[in-house]
Image: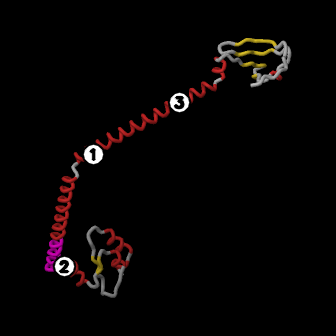
Amino acid sequence: MPFNTEEVAMAIYACQTPVISAVGHETDTTFADFAADLRAPTPSAAAELSAPDVKELYKKLCAYESTLHTLADRKRTNLQAALERAVLRLHTCSPEQKVLRSEQQILHLQNRLDTTMQARLAGYDVKITESVRLLQSLSPFEVLNRGYSMTFKEDTIVSDAKQLATGDQVTIRFAKSSCTAQITAQTGKETGV
């Protein structure tokens, strides 16, 4: 029962040195068994576990060494093959050639961009020039420059003599000036176009 107390179990758990529990016989189980690093069925089995057979250890060590050599040889072979592939790629794909090809491609793309931009700008220039001409031809000020005038009655353009009465004040706008006039008479005749 002394190995079945909380204090003993906590002390075993806190111990920095590995602990083998071998209390009583194989059928006995204590808290110490659960807290220990390893459980042996009997004290004599614990002695055997704590002092392993040197021959077995030597066999394991030899097996580990053989495995280590095999893995190292395989790794060296793989690295050698990878190095050879890299050297071959380096010779077939010279960085200098890649840079030269990239520079040529950039120059080609820059020339295409310049040509395309010049063509588009020229097209826009033509469209802008045509639009300016059209706007100028439709501008009422161009019509005024050709000798016509516009008549306003109280800031409203007069497009028909029927909008006016004798005595109305009107403003007549010319190309470069304007004047005020008074309607003195209406002819009542319609002009044909």
**Where does label 2 land, which residue?**
52
* Residue name at image x 19 percent, y 56 percent: 88
Q: Amino acid at mark 1?
A: Arg
Say whether residue 155 is left or right of residue 64.
Answer: right
First to last magenta residue range: 53-67
Q: Nearer the viewer, mark 3 or mark 2?
A: 3
Q: Looking at the image, which residue is at 36% across and 71% down?
A: 10
Q: Amino acid at mark 3?
A: Ile
| CA gap, disc 1 and disc 2 | 68 Å
> On the image, numbered disc 3 is attached to which residue?
128
Which residue is rendered at x = 66% and y = 15% of the image?
Answer: 175
- Which comes before the other along the chain, label 3 or label 2? 2
Residue at mark 3 to residue at mark 1: CA–CA distance: 40 Å
Q: Main secondary structure of the magenta part?
A: helix
Name the residue that disc number 1 marks: 101
Q: Is residue 27 above or below residue 192?
A: below
Looking at numbered disc 2 in the image, what kind of residue is underneath it?
Pro
